[in-house]
Image (tube, helix red, strand yellow):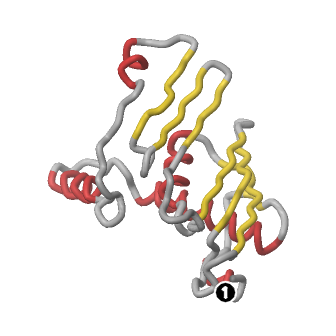
């Protein structure tokens, strides 16, 4: 999960709903020199009844294949793919609009997401300060993504589903787990 924080943030933002509970499994399979997992999975239950699965790993050889977010609904399907979910691979809805048509196949070019992936977010924060407005991504979004990662860790440690809001739990509580 240590490499999934941005995908987890995107999932929470796209779902727009509070999480009820999480069941997570994490392991350190190949990178015993790390103080973290190198593979993890979770089942997330939202309060509105929606369910999500999360899979993350650093065990892909020789490099990351892509980051993918699928959304399946009763009247629509979305797949975001690419190195950093920067492509709309599938955008299908029963009541499709012109805007939906325009979204199909959109790609944002990215030569390398590692090391420069936050540039536009920093620029937005600077612009928000200069123009006295809220930034596009705020501290609450970061906190919510972190809460989900910590809930996955807590679930792994306790071997059972964990309810949110999380309460007291920190990454230090995972010391010695990997």
Q: Residues within 10 Å of mark 1 (few under 14, many from 20)?
A: few
Front residue of this view, candidates 54 and 87: 87
137 on left or right of 8: left
Residue appearing at x 65%, y 77% in the figure: 30
**Quarter of the image holding residue 154?**
bottom right
**Quarter of the image holding residue 103?**
top left
131 on left or right of 78: left
Vertical placement of 116 versus 27: above or below? above
Viewport quadrant of the N terminus = bottom right
Front residue of this view, candidates 43 and 126: 43
Task: Find residue 89 and report its horizontal and vertical position in percent.
Answer: 47, 32
Identify residue for label 1: 175
The residue positioned farthest toward the right in the image shown: 160
Residue appearing at x 15%, y 54% in the figure: 130
Front residue of this view, candidates 178 and 164: 178
19 on left or right of 11: right
Task: Find residue 137 and report its horizontal and vertical position in percent.
Answer: 37, 52
Task: Find residue 41 and report its horizontal and vertical position in percent.
Answer: 70, 59
Residue appearing at x 19%, y 52% in the figure: 127
The residue positioned farthest toward the left in the image shown: 130
Task: Find residue 90 and report its horizontal and vertical position in percent.
Answer: 51, 28
Viewport quadrant of the C terminus = bottom right
Tag count in the figure? 1
Vertical placement of 163 versus 12: above or below? below
**Quarter of the image holding residue 146?**
bottom right
Residue appearing at x 62%, y 84% in the figure: 172
Determine the secondary structure under disc 1: loop
């Amino acid at each position: 999960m240590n490499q999934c924080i941005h995908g987890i943030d995107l999932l929470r933002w796209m779902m727009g709903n509070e999480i009820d509970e999480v069941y997570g499994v994490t392991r350190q399979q190949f990178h015993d020199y790390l103080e973290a997992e190198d593979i993890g999975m979770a089942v997330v239950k939202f309060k509105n009844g929606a369910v999500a699965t999360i899979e993350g790993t650093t065990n892909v050889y020789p490099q990351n294949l892509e980051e993918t977010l699928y959304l399946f609904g009763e009247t629509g399907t979305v797949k975001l793919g690419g190195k950093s979910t920067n492509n709309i691979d599938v955008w299908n809805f029963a009541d499709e609009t012109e805007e939906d048509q325009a979204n199909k196949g959109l790609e944002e070019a990215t030569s390398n997401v590692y090391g420069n992936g936050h540039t536009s977010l920093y620029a937005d924060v600077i612009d928000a300060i200069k123009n006295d407005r809220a930034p596009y991504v705020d501290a609450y979004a970061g906190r919510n993504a972190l809460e989900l990662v910590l809930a996955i860790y807590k679930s792994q440690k306790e071997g059972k589903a964990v309810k949110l809001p999380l309460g007291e739990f920190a990454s230090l509580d995972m010391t010695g787990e990997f």
